[in-house]
Image (cartoon, grey):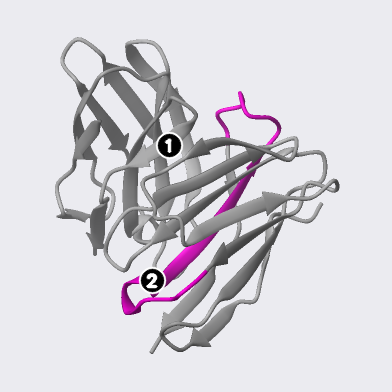
Amino acid sequence: DAGVTQSPTHLIKTRGQQVTLRCSPISGHKSVSWYQQVLGQGPQFIFQYYEKEERGRGNFPDRFSARQFPNYSSELNVNALLLGDSALYLCASSVDNLSYEQYFGPGTRLTVT
Amino acid sequence: GQNIDQPTEMTATEGAIVQINCTYQTSGFNGLFWYQQHAGEAPTFLSYNVLDGLEEKGRFSSFLSRSKGYSYLLLKELQMKDSASYLCALEGYQKVTFGTGTKLQVIP
């Protein structure tokens, strides 16, 4: 079975631009969470989506938004990129929003110049 | 809010036992995770503790004491491949809060 997949693997953007990151959960998983991981730090929670609805939000500005599609895949959008947005963006899927076991994808490495 | 503290780095010898501690302050949580993350890779799930006590899973064991705000991950019979970062995280209020992680280096 395929694990969590994310695209693209790497991305380079300029300050002020917008970016869309994509995530496909494990088949049968209905919950997707997004995390930002800056080098040398632990992942920081951004959003959780379950059944296409936002179920949790971390302390990130409104420049960050996300959505989940009927097939449970998800997109993370970041507007007006800042240098500090450079990080590894991780997607994790779980069976539902009550399941504690999350499976992480390989991540998207975003570099903002 | 939640605050999680872990040692930044640890070094241990191949074949030995190492204990990685995690202390936390929180107004409440459902459970505590431990994840392993090799450099450049995504975190992988190791354990999830809800109740106080020790849970053993092969070479890895995890302990939780809610009253003391304390957890540890115990790695036995260390192998070189265990060199990685180990992340402690609290799950609750529909989000997961990670610590900064402990980078473990296993030496021959």
Chain of the residue under label 2: A
- Residue A2 is situated, as x and y percent measured from the top left of the image, at 78, 56
| Residue designated by label 2 | A85
* Magenta stretch: includes residue B60: no
In this rendering, the answer to whether B8 lies above or below B29 is below
Give the extent of the magenta segment: A79-101
* Amino acid type, residue under disc 1 in the picture: Val
| Residue designated by label 1 | B96
* Magenta stretch: includes residue A83: yes
Quarter assignment of residue B40: bottom left
Badge number at residue B35 = none
Q: Give the class, few, some or many, for how many residues have Cα within 10 Å of label 1's Cα (few <14, many ≥20).
A: many
- Residue at (29%, 19%) from the top-left corner? B64
Chain of the residue under label 1: B
Q: Secondary structure at mark 1?
A: strand
In this rendering, the answer to whether B37 lies above or below A94 is below
Name the residue furthest right.
Answer: A71
- The residues tagged by marks 1 and 2 sit, at their Cα atoms, a distance apart of 20 Å
- Residue B69 is situated, as x and y percent measured from the top left of the image, at 19, 20
- Residue at (58%, 40%) from the top-left corner? A102
* Amino acid type, residue under disc 2 in the picture: Asp
- Residue A21 is situated, as x and y percent measured from the top left of the image, at 62, 68
Q: Are marks 1 and 2 on the same chain?
A: no
